[in-house]
Amino acid sequence: MTDRGNDLVVHHDEERHKFVVELGGREAYLRYVRAGDRTLRYSRTFVPPEYRGRGIGALIVASALDYARERQFHVVPTCPFVQWVADHHPE
């Protein structure tokens, strides 16, 4: 998954239950937990302080929501940032 207009790539690391962007040796990520066969609980997002305010967290959340939508998974956003992105960007 790639950002529209930027070279950042979001990787889904199924083994570690994360959606990840590599940032010069650091990671920005959204961590999730499987909560049943068709449900994902998006539980935590993190962007290193020096990379905040650039839309990286929103990119990761959008990619994770696209992943769930494409597979018809239900998402439980226990992370407040995930909920905020979903509320403000319903597309």
Image: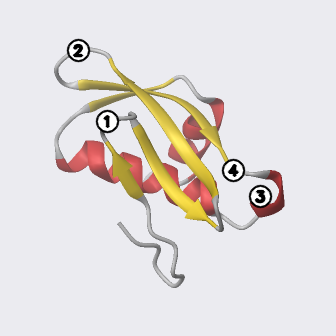
Amino acid found under the numbered disc labelled 1: Glu
In this rendering, position of residue 31 left or right of residue 44? left
CA distance separating discs 4 and 1? 20 Å
CA distance separating discs 2 and 4? 27 Å
Q: Which residue is mark 3?
A: 52
Question: Would you place residue 35 above or below residue 24 in this image?
Answer: above
Give me the disc on residue 47: 4
Dot 3: few (<14), some (14–19), or many (≥20) neighbours within 10 Å?
few
Nearer the observer: mark 1 or 2; the answer is: 1
Amino acid found under the numbered disc labelled 2: Gly
Which of pointers 1 and 2 lies earlier in the amino acid sequence? 1
* Residue drawn where x is 23% and y is 33% of the image: 73
Q: Which residue is mark 1?
A: 15
Q: Which residue is mark 2?
A: 36
- Numbered disc total: 4
Element marked by disc 4: loop
In this rendering, position of residue 64 left or right of residue 46? left
Amino acid found under the numbered disc labelled 3: Arg
Residue 44's x, y, as percent? 58, 31
Element marked by disc 1: loop
Q: Residue furthest right?
A: 50
Dot 2: few (<14), some (14–19), or many (≥20) neighbours within 10 Å?
few
Residue 1's x, y, as percent? 35, 66
Which of pointers 4 and 1 lies earlier in the amino acid sequence? 1
CA distance separating discs 3 and 1? 26 Å
Dot 1: few (<14), some (14–19), or many (≥20) neighbours within 10 Å?
few
In this rendering, position of residue 44 left or right of residue 90? right
